[in-house]
């Protein structure tokens, strides 16, 4: 045991840092693969507890029986996170954009972990092992428990005022021609965006196809109140994005982790023959923590809404 401990905490600073980072990296990747591919869970275990472990573990190993500063503690934790992200990309587990989206949360939690690790070894230089063992048990237990939790449905509404009467706007809501190439940066990163919409049939029961760059949303019409309200369910939907990577990535979160349930367009008459058009999407995602990922999801859905509403506005005001 003493020989093993001595191997983990050599006197050479560079070797000690390497061992601290490498050990934490291997364990973190192992739990990441288990969370994603075994339990199918993108939740607190993956995005909170694992980064917390990445903050605490290398600091305890690196600082055991050694005086280090807070800056050194965060440095070794941040390097662990960096190598972790690069390895995810290299092994085709995740793409660049998803890692960038998760990085702000990861950095905060890793920093918090480095603070906790630093305080542990500062007060008791020879302690820390019970904390690491506890985290090693918490990650799989938490992932297994939370994977069956029910997600909550969220609605996002975006509106625009159009200089045309509701009857004209309605025609461009039901279906619309090809949109121009996007100028928004978010859609240049691989996030799917709408390109046109077609409808087969008329009235309730008709099938609307909103075509995106990754495929089509199949939308059976549930309310046809011309020219006031068009509502529809979402029967099928394409992947929400195409990952940016050196490899062809098909990450599990691209399938049934962001789910659009239904949508609607409401046309509200305004003075002087104008129309306020409101687009609403109801969705849920099985990625936690919800408050963090909902910010990203709401931003993306608003961006999609704005692209469609601006297109409808332009076509309606031409008539």
Image (tube, grey):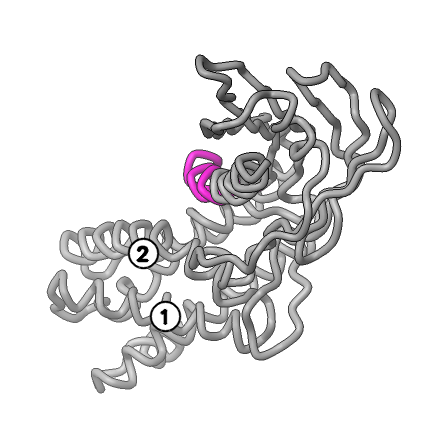
The quarter in which the C terminus is drawn is top right
Asked whether residue 294 is drawn in magenta, I would say: yes
Residue 60 at x, y percent in the picture: 28, 62
Along the line of sight, the residue nearer the viewer: 194 or 94: 194
| Label 2 element class | helix
Query: In percent of the image, x 77 and y 42: which residue is there?
Result: 198
Query: In percent of the image, x 46 and y 55: which residue is there?
Result: 186
**Mark 2 neighbour class, 10 Å CA radius: few under 14, some 14 to 19, many 20 or more:** some
**Start and end of the magenta stretch?**
287-301
Query: In percent of the image, x 29 and y 76: which residue is there?
Result: 9
Above or below residue 302? Residue 193 is: below
- Asked if residue 183 can be seen in this view, the reply is yes
Q: CA distance from mark 1 to mark 2?
A: 10 Å
Above or below residue 297? Residue 67 is: below
- The numbered disc on residue 107 is 2
**Mark 1 neighbour class, 10 Å CA radius: few under 14, some 14 to 19, many 20 or more:** some
Asked whether residue 86 is drawn in magenta, I would say: no
Q: Is residue 274 left or right of residue 144?
A: left
Residue 165 at x, y percent in the picture: 56, 21
Q: Earlier in the sequence, mark 1 or mark 2?
A: 1
Residue 141 at x, y percent in the picture: 57, 43
Q: Is residue 301 left or right of residue 59?
A: right
Name the image quarter holding residue 221: top right
Residue wearing tag 1: 82
- The numbered disc on residue 44 is none
- Asked if residue 44 can be seen in this view, the reply is no
């Amino acid at each position: 045991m003493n020989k093993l401990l001595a191997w983990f905490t050599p006197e050479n600073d560079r070797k000690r840092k390497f061992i601290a980072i490498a050990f934490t990296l291997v364990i973190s990747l192992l739990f990441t693969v288990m969370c994603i591919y075994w339990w199918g869970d993108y939740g607190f275990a993956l995005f909170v507890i694992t980064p917390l472990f990445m903050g605490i573990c290398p600091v305890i190993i690196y600082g055991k029986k050694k005086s280090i500063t807070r800056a050194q503690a965060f440095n070794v934790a941040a390097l662990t996170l960096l190598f972790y992200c690069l390895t995810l990309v290299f092994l085709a587990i995740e793409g660049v954009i998803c890692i960038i989206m998760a990085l702000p949360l990861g950095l905060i939690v890793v920093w918090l972990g480095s603070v906790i690790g630093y305080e542990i070894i500062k007060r008791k230089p020879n302690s820390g092992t019970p904390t690491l063992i506890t985290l090693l048990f918490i990650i799989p237990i938490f992932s297994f428990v939370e994977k069956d939790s029910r997600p909550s449905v969220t609605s996002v509404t975006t509106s625009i005022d159009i200089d045309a009467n509701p009857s004209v706007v309605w025609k461009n809501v039901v279906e619309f021609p090809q949109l121009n190439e996007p100028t928004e940066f978010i859609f240049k990163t691989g996030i799917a965006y709408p390109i046109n919409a077609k409808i087969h049939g008329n009235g309730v029961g008709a099938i609307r196809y909103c075509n995106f760059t990754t495929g089509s949303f199949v939308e059976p019409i549930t309310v046809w109140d011309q020219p006031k309200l068009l509502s529809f369910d979402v029967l099928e939907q394409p992947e929400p994005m195409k990952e940016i990577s050196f490899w062809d990535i098909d990450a599990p979160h691209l399938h049934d982790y962001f789910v659009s349930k239904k949508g609607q367009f409401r046309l509200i008459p305004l003075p002087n023959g104008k129309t306020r058009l409101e687009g609403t999407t109801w969705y849920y995602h099985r990625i936690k923590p919800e408050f963090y990922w909902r910010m990203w999801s709401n931003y993306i859905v608003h961006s999609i809404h704005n692209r469609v509403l601006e297109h409808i506005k332009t076509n309606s005001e031409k008539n």
